[in-house]
């Protein structure tokens, strides 16, 4: 008889539930999607009840034919926010990390409260709940006054299953409201947001274990539920990137580069985040908004005749173009950008266009730009004093032979690709195993991660990208005045 852990990964567009054994092997899974809505420019919201229902259905689907469940463990997309009434019913939509409506509030916070980044570890960017709360207070004051509780999507689902309002330190440290020193709500941040402590969930460790009170999953009441953490920090655990000097890279719709450290560390230049995971384990790094979304844009904008899924053909064209795209550079800021700039006004731009550049050049320059942006994050990590000796990567980009090699060439380092693709879900499973005594330690659990392939940089291509990276960084600085002018023009047209 074998005990299983159900890892529940609540993502931005779907929830994946995977049943793992104590060796990290998957035995069942469920996947339920839900729409990401953009009712206004810059908004990115969801129906919180629809997401909750989909997450529960994913768990039920994963349990088909499975017995002997030792417990559940959760991972969740970070930075979400929903306002609830006295009866725990949603008064607002679920605002996701991609909702940029609070850009003005974030800029004001950077100017008026620059020390908040250092005290909370969260960049002052509209992705975070702190500026979102200020937006509601300023733009929807009557609604803001009626909200009894503010929560994220995982809190909503955990409350549905256990009756408890709790938030793990990992997700809490992504709100901009938690102190890195105390691992509790920061009084200064709460005052700036205009919320009271009792309007937020209780902050608990990621290995906090509750009991199921609801029978709607088909599991016995009393089954342990390990609250888990945020998807980014747990992806490091799921990739086995928890040893000193080992970083985790992911490229899906967006992207990120992160590594674990033994104590919280703040980049003095404000380029990196610092999120808690477990005692003695913190995750520093940076997320980028523009990952696979950039390749998807090239299909829509440059090759609409290729149909809804042109990626394979576009990557084939890009592979025929030399590294560096023969002098063409793209700043891939189609969705503004997070690390290391944390900038809401950046715009995409092609620089260096010549008459001989064709579709293949435009596509290659776009995905080179994504990799170069991750190169800036890597440089920021090193500038902040963190040694990166090894990188492990996962995400949808890894299906592309070209993109796998390009990432290694641009970063100038070997990249390891694991056998299992579910980084965050597997990380949640490892955390759950450790909390429930099914693993000796998190380090031991991550040793179960098997690396299937290692890509090494090609010296010639790596030299081209190393030469281009400073220019790529400089172009952002040079074009910022134009980006700001365009942003003001957009705001004026919207009034």
Image: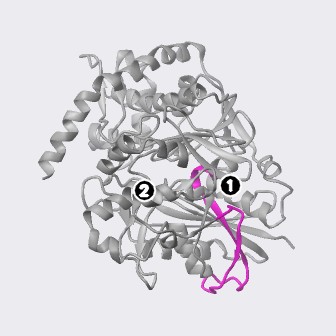
Label 2: which secondary element: helix
Q: Quadrant of the N terminus?
A: bottom right
Label 1: which secondary element: helix
Residue linked to disc 1: 427
Q: Is residue 37 above or below residue 422?
A: below
Rendering coords of residue 151 (x, y %): 48, 68
The residue under the point 60% across, 18% down is: 458
Q: Which mark is first along the chain, 1 or 2?
A: 2
Number of marks drawn: 2
Residue linked to disc 2: 130
- On screen, residue 362 versus residue 9, left or right, reads left
From the viewer's side, name the closer residue of 336 and 280: 280
Rendering coords of residue 160 (x, y %): 55, 80
Is residue 473 inside the magenta stretch?
no
Q: Nearer the viewer, mark 2 or mark 1?
A: 2
Is residue 227 inside the magenta stretch?
yes
CA neighbours of label 1 inside 10 A, class few (<14), some (14 to 19), many (20+): many
- On screen, residue 111 versus residue 167, left or right, reads left
The residue under the point 43% across, 58% down is: 129
Magenta part of the protein: which range? 204-233
Q: Dividing the picture into quarters, in which one does residue 343 lie? A: top left
């Amino acid at each position: 008889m074998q005990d299983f852990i159900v890892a529940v990964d609540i993502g931005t567009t779907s929830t994946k539930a995977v049943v793992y054994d104590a060796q990290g092997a998957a035995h069942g899974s469920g996947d339920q999607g839900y729409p990401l809505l953009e009712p206004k420019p810059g908004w990115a919201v969801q129906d919180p009840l629809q997401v909750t229902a989909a997450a529960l259905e994913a768990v039920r689907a994963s349990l088909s034919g499975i017995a002997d469940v030792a417990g559940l463990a959760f991972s969740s997309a970070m930075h979400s926010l929903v306002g609830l009434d006295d009866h725990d019913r949603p008064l607002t939509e679920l605002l996701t990390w991609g909702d940029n409506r609070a850009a003005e509030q974030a800029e004001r916070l950077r100017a008026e409260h620059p020390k908040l980044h250092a005290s909370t570890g969260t960049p002052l960017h509209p992705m975070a709940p702190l500026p979102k709360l200020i937006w509601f207070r300023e733009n929807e004051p009557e609604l803001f006054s009626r909200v009894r509780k503010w929560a994220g999507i995982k809190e909503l689902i955990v409350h549905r299953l256990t009756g408890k309002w709790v938030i793990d330190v990992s997700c809490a440290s992504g709100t901009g409201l938690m102190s890195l020193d105390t691992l509790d709500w920061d009084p200064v941040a709460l005052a700036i947001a205009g919320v009271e402590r009792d309007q937020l969930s209780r902050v608990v460790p990621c290995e906090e274990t509750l009991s199921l009170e609801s029978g709607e999953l088909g599991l016995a009441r009393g089954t342990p539920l390990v609250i888990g953490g945020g998807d980014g920090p747990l992806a490091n655990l799921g990739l086995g990137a928890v040893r000193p000097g080992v970083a985790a890279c992911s490229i899906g719709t967006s992207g990120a580069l992160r590594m674990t450290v033994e104590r919280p560390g703040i980049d003095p230049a404000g380029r990196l985040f610092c999120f808690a995971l477990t005692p003695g384990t913190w995750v520093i790094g940076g997320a980028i908004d523009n990952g696979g979304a950039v390749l998807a844009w090239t299909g829509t904008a440059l090759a609409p005749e290729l149909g809804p899924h042109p990626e394979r053909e576009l990557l084939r064209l890009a592979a025929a173009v030399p590294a560096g795209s023969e002098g063409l550079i793209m700043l891939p800021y189609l969705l503004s950008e997070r690390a290391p700039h944390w900038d809401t006004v950046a715009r995409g731009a092609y620089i260096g266009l010549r008459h001989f550049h064709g579709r293949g050049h435009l596509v290659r320059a776009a995905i080179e730009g994504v990799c170069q942006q991750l190169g800036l994050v890597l440089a920021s990590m090193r500038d902040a004093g963190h040694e990166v000796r090894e990188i492990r990567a996962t995400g949808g980009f890894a299906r592309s032979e070209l993109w796998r090699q390009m990432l290694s060439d641009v970063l100038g380092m070997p990249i390891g690709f694991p056998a299992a693709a579910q980084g965050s879900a597997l990380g949640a499973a490892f955390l759950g195993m450790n909390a429930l005594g099914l693993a000796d330690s998190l380090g031991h659990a991550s040793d179960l991660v098997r690396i299937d392939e290692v890509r090494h940089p090609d010296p010639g291509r790596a030299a081209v990208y190393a030469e281009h990276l400073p220019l790529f960084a400089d172009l952002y600085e040079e074009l910022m005045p134009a980006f700001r002018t365009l942003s003001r023009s957009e705001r004026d047209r919207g009034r």
